[in-house]
Amino acid sequence: MQEIRCGGCNRLLAKGSAVDLVIKCPRCHTINHVRAMSPDQESQRAPGMEPSRAKSDL
């Protein structure tokens, strides 16, 4: 579950996922606009590229 935090004061505003969300922070009154970039962004890698590994995996 993704945390959505205020860009001004870092207060937790919501938990979950959103396609398009505009929310005003009750603490600092900053307008926060959250948009989903891509539904499967993690699975979209450049061809021939492998995920990086930690040294402990080698």
Image (cartoon, grey):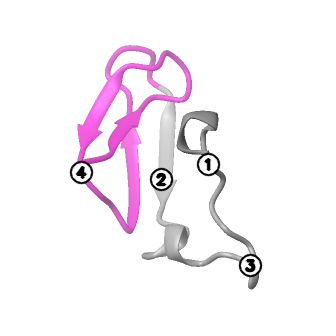
Q: Earlier in the sequence, mark 4 or mark 3?
A: 4
Q: Which mark is residue 32?
A: none
Q: Secondary structure at mark 1?
A: loop
Q: Mark 2: few, some, or many residues within 10 Å (few <14, many ≥20)?
A: some
The numbered dot on residue 34 is: 2
User: What residue sits right under mark 3 in the picture?
Assistant: 46
Q: Label 4, on which residue?
A: 16
| Badge 2 amino acid | Val
Residue 9 among magenta residues? yes
Q: Label 4 vs label 1: CA separation?
A: 28 Å
Queried whether the magenta region covers residue 15, the answer comes back as yes
Q: Tell me the residue at 32%/22% (across/down).
A: 26
Tell me the amino acid under the disc marked 4.
Answer: Gly
Look at the numbered discs 3 and 1 and tell me whether their residues touch, using CB distance below 8 Å. no
Sequence-first disc among 2 and 1:
2
Rate crowding at label 4 as few (under 14), some (14 to 19) or many (20 or more) other CA atoms within 10 Å.
few
Give the magenta-colored segment's residue range: 1-29
CA separation in Å, label 2 and label 4: 12 Å
Q: Amino acid at mark 1?
A: Arg
